[in-house]
Image (cartoon, rainbow, N blue to C red):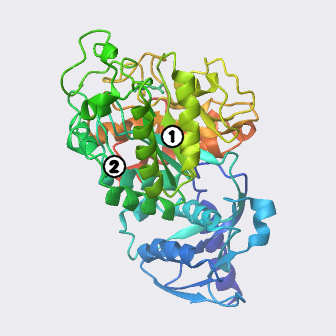
């Protein structure tokens, strides 16, 4: 009996030690690995305390893929269950708004957090312990073993975003939901929608029906047109919020506005009728790529009525606290006055304004968030909050390699995973980072996928993990291991050279 015992004990030890460590992206703050692994049993009980029911449902979804049975019990004393979820507000000091603790040991798995967001991220980390097939919901009957670990984690930055330009080429509810799913895996939490531009208007505004009847019909050549109905917009927001992602809608003003001028020509100035630098103001939809040539008539008070009505209606259907008012790439003697007025209009509807860095040429309200894209604006705002979208690191409409077709080159010639990853900032006013994909040359779902992935995983780690803890040589090994998972998720990702993809 002794022999048998030690023999099976030995076998077990070998099995346990051979189980490799999962590649977790973004890298958690503290991880300690232990030898051994927890094999998910046939029968699972999730024991969760008051207020953590949402997390229990996410965990149940994950576990259902393992083929075992799963039952849920709300129980505050935690004597039940091999899966325990503990929501404890007193952990906020230690873990902040989005942190969590995850322990995998011989007795099972314990998830702790002060908030739903933190607990959701505990589940996302756990998801990366499971084999990639979990992403297809086809793990049935497959034995899953989880390497013993003790994790304590919280993000460096609160703003971890991506931006989808749905204006140049339209991407609708289905694509955006898939994008949200992918963001969630990497703990990204802000989805900025560039909803309007010269080529098209993508959000239904009921008080301005021509925006959808006329302005939504356009796109760049080869691009798709269309718009989100308010119902779809709400559905997207709810879907995102369940995953701790807040939608940040942008109405780009007072430039980049031609599609709206086409719908409401009275907002154009007569003397500006031929403002396009290369050709007369097109009598119809604009399908080119030029920027910086259209503008609202800032002399006309009707412009401000329009802005107020559009922002008011958008605010009324927006759940997050922010509205992005654009403000980029325009020179106009009345620009600064516009920014000040738009700032107060956004506040009037109880939202916090965000704008491209040019807005800081004038004094904006203290809660205004500036989104830096080239870092060249001479700011009069010393301590304005900043989102970093510096184009040389984060403009993912630029190629994954210098050779990639249909990509922008104006900022830099290709942005590799390493160039994204190498970003760091010592500016104490930075609240986070965000990676935009502009869609002048992104016309299909597959193309949008390969602009974001795998680089958005590097964006996520830049946003989550302090720069002192980041090392590209180590990150690229973890990223390589994510290849099969990205495939299982149906992502048409770019096979970035220099990454030893599994
Ligand atoms: C700059 S930077 C833009 C967009 C273009 C993009 C193309 C900024 C705020 N605006 O209008 O789509 O370059 O790369």
| Quarter of the rendering occupied by the C terminus | top left
Most foreground residue, 243 or 81 = 243
Q: Left or right: 184 with respect to 226? A: right
Q: Establish if 146 lies above or below 475.
A: below
User: x, y percentage for residue 280?
Assistant: 23, 12
User: x, y percentage for residue 367?
Assistant: 67, 42
Work out how far the residue at label 1 is from the one at label 2, CA to CA, in angstroms. Answer: 16 Å
User: In front: mark 1 or mark 2?
Assistant: 2
The residue depicted at 54 percent of the width and 75 percent of the height is 54
Crowding around mark 2 (Cα neighbors within 10 Å: few <14, some 14 to 19, many 20+) is many
User: x, y percentage for residue 332?
Assistant: 48, 17
Q: Left or right: 174 with respect to 39? A: left
Crowding around mark 1 (Cα neighbors within 10 Å: few <14, some 14 to 19, many 20+) is many
Earlier residue among tags 1 and 2: 2
Looking at the rendering, the quadrant in which ligand 1 lies is top left
- Which residue is denoted by mark 1 in the rendering? 324
| Quarter of the rendering occupied by the N terminus | bottom right
The residue depicted at 74 percent of the width and 71 percent of the height is 89
Q: Is residue 219 visible?
A: no
Most foreground residue, 307 or 270 = 270
User: x, y percentage for residue 453?
Assistant: 43, 40
- Which residue is denoted by mark 2 in the rendering? 205
Where disc 2 sits, the SS reads: loop
The residue depicted at 31 percent of the width and 23 percent of the height is 405
Q: Quadrant of residue 134?
A: bottom left
Where disc 1 sits, the SS reads: strand
Most foreground residue, 204 or 220 = 204
């Amino acid at each position: 009996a002794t022999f048998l015992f030690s023999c099976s004990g030995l076998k077990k030890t070998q099995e346990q030690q051979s189980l490799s460590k999962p590649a977790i992206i973004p890298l958690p703050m503290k991880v300690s690995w232990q030898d051994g692994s927890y094999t998910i049993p046939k029968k699972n009980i999730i024991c969760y305390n008051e207020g953590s029911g949402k997390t229990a449902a996410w965990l149940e979804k994950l576990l259902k893929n393992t083929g075992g049975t799963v039952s849920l019990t709300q129980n505050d004393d935690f004597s039940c269950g091999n899966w325990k979820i503990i929501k404890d507000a007193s952990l906020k000091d230690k873990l902040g708004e989005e942190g969590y603790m995850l322990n995998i040991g011989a007795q099972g798995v314990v998830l702790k957090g002060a908030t739903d967001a933190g607990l959701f991220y505990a589940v996302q980390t756990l998801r990366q312990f499971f084999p990639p097939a979990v992403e297809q919901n086809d793990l049935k009957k497959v034995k899953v073993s989880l390497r013993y670990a003790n994790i304590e984690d919280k993000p460096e930055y609160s703003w971890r975003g991506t931006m989808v330009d749905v204006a140049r080429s339209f991407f609708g509810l289905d694509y955006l939901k898939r994008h949200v799913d992918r963001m969630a895996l990497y703990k990204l939490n802000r989805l900025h929608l560039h909803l309007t531009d010269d080529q098209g208007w993508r959000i239904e505004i009921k008080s301005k029906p021509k925006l959808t009847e006329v302005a939504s019909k356009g796109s760049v050549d080869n691009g798709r047109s269309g718009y989100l109905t308010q119902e779809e917009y709400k559905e997207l927001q709810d879907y995102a919020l369940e995953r701790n992602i807040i939608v940040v809608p942008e109405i780009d003003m007072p430039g980049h506005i031609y599609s709206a001028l086409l719908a409401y020509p009275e907002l154009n100035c007569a003397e500006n009728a031929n403002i396009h630098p290369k050709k007369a103001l097109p009598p119809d939809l604009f399908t080119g790529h030029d920027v910086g040539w259209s503008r609202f008539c800032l002399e006309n008070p009707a412009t401000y009525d329009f802005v107020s009505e559009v922002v008011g209606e958008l605010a009324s259907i927006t759940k997050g606290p922010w509205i992005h008012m654009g403000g980029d790439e325009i020179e106009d003697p009345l620009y600064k006055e516009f920014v000040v007025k738009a700032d107060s209009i956004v506040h009037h509807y109880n939202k916090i304004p965000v704008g491209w860095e040019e807005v800081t040429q004038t004094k904006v309200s203290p809660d205004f968030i500036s989104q830096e894209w080239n870092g060249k604006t001479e700011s009069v705002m010393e301590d304005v909050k900043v989102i970093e979208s510096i184009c040389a690191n984060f403009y993912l409409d630029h190629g994954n390699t210098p050779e990639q077709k249909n990509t922008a080159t104006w900022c830099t010639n290709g942005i590799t995973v390493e160039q994204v990853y190498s970003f760091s900032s010592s500016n104490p006013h930075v609240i986070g980072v965000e990676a935009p994909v502009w869609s002048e040359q992104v016309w299909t779902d597959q193309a949008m996928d390969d602009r974001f992935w795998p680089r958005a995983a590097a964006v996520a780690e830049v946003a989550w993990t302090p720069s002192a803890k980041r090392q590209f040589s180590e990150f690229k090994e973890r990223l390589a291991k994510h290849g099969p998972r990205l495939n299982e998720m149906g992502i048409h990702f770019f096979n970035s050279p220099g990454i030893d993809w599994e």
